[in-house]
Image: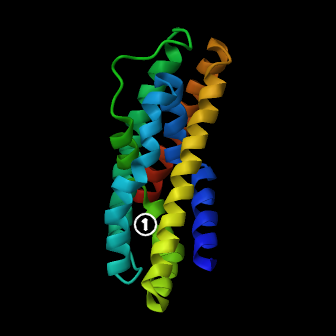
Amino acid sequence: MQYVIAGLTLGLSAAASPGPLQAYLLSSTMRNGWRRTLPASLAPLLSDGPIVALVVLLLTQTPPALLRGLRFAGGVFLLYLAYGAWMAFQETSSPTQVSHRTPNSLLQAAMINLLNPAPYIFWATVAGPLLLQGWALAPSRAISFITAFYSSLMGGMAALILLFSLARNLGPRVTRTLNGFSSLALALFGLYQLWTAIAG
């Protein structure tokens, strides 16, 4: 139970923590609706496999050069997404309209995760050591931790999408405001990642 509780707690915390992925979920829900955005809650299943394998196999030490490269590439990608959210902010369509040019939200969310250094740092400093410790005691403990973590992470992200969808139905003014907020948040996260990549 110790590893199940740890996984549930860390997963919910990761889902609720403000970050580029949460800003993207807000932007996508405002533009495309919850049905087309909900698959994005599965993004960790696509992106975290390589992250966990890389970090754990490197004995929880991620090379600084890799983190700088991820920050730079992630910053550029987030600015691209911020531009899309800004274009949605300028539109005057009603909140019930859904764009027919919807990109694949699952792939975009997975790309955000892969190009964000936060998951690498998280697995190197918190989750990776817990996973290795559990595996050393009994493989079932590590499996319990992973299962609980991703269940609560994806469940929490799905809940956020549904919450954003409720806000989307409050009217065009609220939708437009949230589109503007998500555009600003994505741009700030992107600029921050570029700055830390260059300054680091």
Quadrant in which the N terminus is drawn? bottom right
Would you place residue 148 above or below residue 34 in this image? below
Colour setup of the view: rainbow
- Secondary structure under the numbered disc 1 in the rendered image: helix
Badge 1 is on which residue?
120
> Could you tell me residue 129's position as x and y percent?
49, 81
Q: Nearer the viewer, residue 125 or 4?
A: 4
Would you place residue 70 above or below residue 77 in this image? below
Q: How many marks?
A: 1
> Could you tell me residue 52's position as x and y percent?
38, 69
> Could you tell me residue 37's position as x and y percent?
46, 33
Quadrant in which the C terminus is drawn? bottom left
Q: Nearer the viewer, residue 158 or 99?
A: 158
Q: Nearer the viewer, residue 44 or 189?
A: 44
Would you place residue 59 above or below residue 43 in this image? below
> Could you tell me residue 118's position as x and y percent?
48, 61
The image quarter in which residue 3 lies: bottom right
The image quarter in which residue 139 lies: bottom left
Which three-letter amino acid code belongs to the residue tagged 1?
Tyr
Q: Can residue 114 be seen from the camera position used here?
A: no
Q: Residue at x 42, y 80 (%)?
A: 60
